Image (spheres, helix red, strand yellow):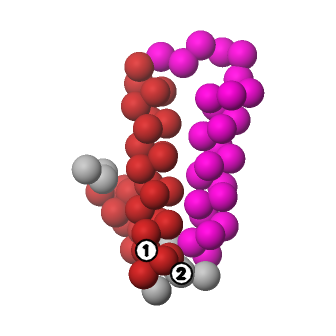
């Protein structure tokens, strides 16, 4: 389930900007998960999971266009 803010972002995402948005979201996710020395709590894990879901939605939209 996407949050209202995520749905709004998807409406703003243009197909031409989609690949850049996906790359940015993946980079943000990977930095937080793989390059941070800080422990990740449950709330942050949930947010990172939502970021992954968001980039997958954007990828799907880009493929459809």
Instruction: Say whether residue 26 is magenta.
Output: yes
Residue nearer the viewer, 60 or 4 = 60
**Stretch in magenta:** 17-41
Q: How many marks?
A: 2
Rendered view: 45 above or below 22: above
Q: Is residue 12 visible?
A: no
Rendered view: 6 above or below 8: above
* Kind of element beneath mark 2: loop
Task: Indicate left or right for 37 with 3 as reference.
Answer: right
Q: Residue drawn 59% across and 60% down?
A: 22
* Kind of element beneath mark 1: helix
Residue 3 image position (x, y, % from top left)? 30, 51
Where is residue 9, by image quadrant? bottom left
Identify the residue position indicated by label 2 in the image.
15
Q: Residue drawn 46% across and 86% down?
A: 65
Residue 13 image position (x, y, % from top left)? 50, 73
Going from the N terminus, do you reach mark 2 or mark 1 first?
Answer: 2
- Confirm or deny contact between disc 2 and disc 1 (CB under 8 A): yes
Identify the residue position indicated by label 1 in the image.
61
Kindly report the distance in space between the C-alpha atoms of the residues bearing marks 2 and 1. 7 Å
Residue 30 image position (x, y, % from top left)? 66, 38
| Residue that protrudes farthest toward the bottom in the picture | 65
Residue density around tag 2, few if under 14, some if 14–19, many if 20 or more, within 10 Å: some
Q: Residue drawn 62% across and 49% down?
A: 26
Q: Residue drawn 74% across and 27% down?
A: 35
Residue 44 image position (x, y, % from top left)? 48, 27
Rendered view: 56 above or below 64: above
Task: Indicate left or right for 42 with 31 as reference.
Answer: left
Instruction: Say whether residue 49 is magenta.
Output: no
Task: Indicate left or right for 31 with 42 as reference.
Answer: right
């Amino acid at each position: 389930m996407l949050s209202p803010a995520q749905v709004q972002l998807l409406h703003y995402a243009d197909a031409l900007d989609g690949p850049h948005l996906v790359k940015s979201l993946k980079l943000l996710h990977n930095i937080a998960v793989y390059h941070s020395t800080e422990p990740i709590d449950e709330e942050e894990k949930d947010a990172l999971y939502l970021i992954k879901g968001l980039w997958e939605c954007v990828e799907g939209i880009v493929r459809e266009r």
